[in-house]
Image (cartoon, grey):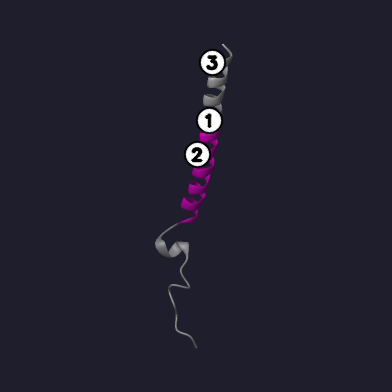
Amino acid sequence: MDPFDPAIHYGPNDAGVSALSIALTVIAILIGSWAFGAAYALIVNYFKGRKEE
């Protein structure tokens, strides 16, 4: 029988990461990407408006 190899059998809970922190990280990435897109759209619309004037 093979000995236990922690490099193979290592999971997120071994580092003290909970499901809640994983979910919050995913939500933060989604909100951050949405905010970046919204800011980009505002900047583009601002410059479009100035160009037409």
**Residue 35, image x, y percentages:** 52, 34
Q: Is residue 31 magenta?
A: yes
**Residue 24, image x, y percentages:** 49, 47
Residue corresponding to mark 2: 32
| Nearer to me, 35 or 46 | 46
Image-based side of 46 in relation to 6, left or right:
right
Q: Secondary structure at mark 3?
A: helix
**In front: mark 3 or mark 2?**
3
Residue corresponding to mark 3: 50
Picture quadrant of residue 44: top right
Q: Of label 1 and label 3, which has the lower sequence position?
A: 1
The amino acid marked with disc number 1 is Tyr
**Residue 27, image x, y percentages:** 52, 44
The amino acid marked with disc number 2 is Gly
Q: Is residue 40 magenta?
A: no
Residue range (magenta): 18-37
